[in-house]
Image (cartoon, helix red, strand yellow):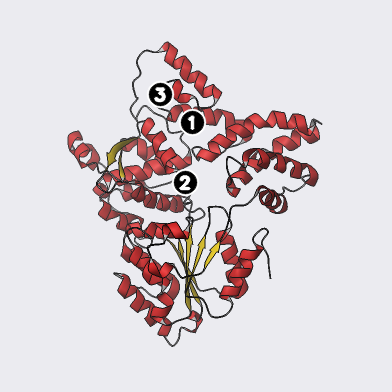
Amino acid sequence: MVGILCREAQVSSLVAAMEGNLPQALLIWGPPSTGKSLVFSTALSQCGITRVAKISAIEIMCGKRPFFETLLKQVWRDGEVKCENLPVFVRQLRTMCDHRDAKHLDKTVIIIDEAEYLRDNHSEILEVLARLQELIQSNLCVVVFSSIVPSLGFSGICSMRSIPTIHFPQYSEEEIVDIITTYYKPKNADSQLFTQYVNMVINVFYQGCRDLRKLLRLTLSNWESVQKQHTIQRQSLHNVWKNVVPQLKEDFKALNSQFLPMTDNNKRDKSFSTATTSLASPAMTVSQSTNLPSTVSKALAATANTTTTTTVPSTKERTYDDIPTFSRYILIGSYLATHNPPSSDKRFFVKGSTRKTGKKMKLNVGAHLQENVSERTRALRSFDQNRLKSIFAFLVSYCSGGTEAYEGNVDWLMQISSLCQSQFLQSLGEDTSGNIKYRCLADYDFILKIAKSVDFELNNYLYRLL
């Protein structure tokens, strides 16, 4: 049996549960970056289970039909399927499993990632999925992934109370050090020096962040500088640590807020300062900038002393060069959510609904120039964070060619607050359901430039240009 460092117990539990007849359902829960997906995929490979369907619960925001059809296509993989609602989904899945030629469906696993998105408005889906094996009379298991405590998140769903649960706790300091030094030690790196460096980094920053991926990135991004100063310049590790700590702190602020992706060591100071000042509100006072780096605080203080009134520049006057890729996706998604009706989201952003014909679509690109400004302002639609997240997930997958995926542990409040301060977004307050509504204030030309910078065809996804 292949083991995974610091997760041997979880691997053993999953293999024992999946070896014979599959359980009706499993609930795997724990904070982000605790090895849930890696351990489960390892257990599946050891048990020889290859028929796996996986979907993120956030896709339910695009509608129930695309949600169920995506699952059925992954299970069956042959031909087209149509599924309007939950009863039809159960009936069609049972028909697939009863098919005489479907012997490869003896063991099937359906994975529902980020299941907490279903607990409030779509709890009936979780009720049925947890009893799906009983309903279709087949050797099928539904595995639910969640980052919240089951007793708090799923206590109101009866069928979820009795299913087995497997907990993935946060890694301890010692476990993170073991994982980084075992699996991620750079080639030609001195083992003793690298272990000492990793221990020092984790001891300092573990209390502020326990996310393995963030701590790993923070550690490796400064390793070359440490190795160069210690090996080539012959400095002691104590002096090297004193030199690298300021940079580590600055990187930690950027990485922990997920505001700016970390860049090359030579360009990191300049890019962080320029991006923070460009996205900070021009009306921000010196007292509000205490959490920013010292270089940015000094720049804001100098600006406050030399100017009496500040005007917010239009988006045409702003530059997009210093806006990080993460924020560009959010800006594009917010612009599409503002200018497209919600009914068009399925057409544009649902898997399998995007047109892939060789013929170019005839787009009325000049239509936005002929519209009256007041009419366009009235046509602006508000959106909430849930709709923006679903569009953002599509943008990440589309612009990266499928190599990257949406991560659910994104600090959206930090991102949206920064964009609101910079006058790219406008907060409209809460609706009757308690959801905060937003609206994109950026103009077409500015968003078009940002879309081109990430190789996204904006005009093909604007409803008014069809």
Left or right: residue 427 versus residue 375 is: right
- Report x, y in % for residue 40: 57, 65
* Residue farthest right in this picture: 234
> Quick one: label 1, few (<14), some, or many (20+) residues within 10 Å?
some
Q: Give the side of residue 313 with respect to residue 265, left or right.
A: left
Could you give the CA–CA distance between mark 3 and mark 1, rounded to whole angstroms?
15 Å
Inspect the image, locate mark 2, and give the three-letter code of the amino acid beneath it. Answer: Val
Q: Report the residue marked by disc 1.
A: 275
> Picture coordinates of residue 282 (x, y %)?
39, 23
Label 1 secondary element: helix
The residue at the point 66 percent across, 42 percent down is 202
Q: Is residue 444 above or below residue 300?
A: below
419 and 356: which is toward the camera: 419
Q: Which residue is mark 3?
A: 284
**Could you classify mark 3 by the number of other residues whose Cα lies within 10 Å: few (under 14), some (14-19), or many (20 or more)?**
some
Compare residues 426 and 262 and report the one nearer the observer. Answer: 426
- Amino acid type at image mark 1: Ala
The reply to whether residue 441 is visible in this rendering is yes
The dot on residue 410 is 2
Residue 358 makes an appearance in the image: no
Q: Looking at the picture, how far across and down is residue 83, in whole percent?
A: 31, 71
In space, the residues marked 1 and 2 are separated at their CA atoms by: 19 Å
Numbered disc 2: secondary structure: loop
At 35% across and 76% down in the image, what residue appears? 90
The tag earlier along the polypeptide, 2 or 3, is 3
Image location of residue 257, percent across then percent down = 50, 38
Q: Which numbered marker is on residue 95?
A: none
Q: Residues within 10 Å of mark 2 (few under 14, many from 20)?
A: few
Q: Residue 59's quadrant in the figure?
A: bottom left
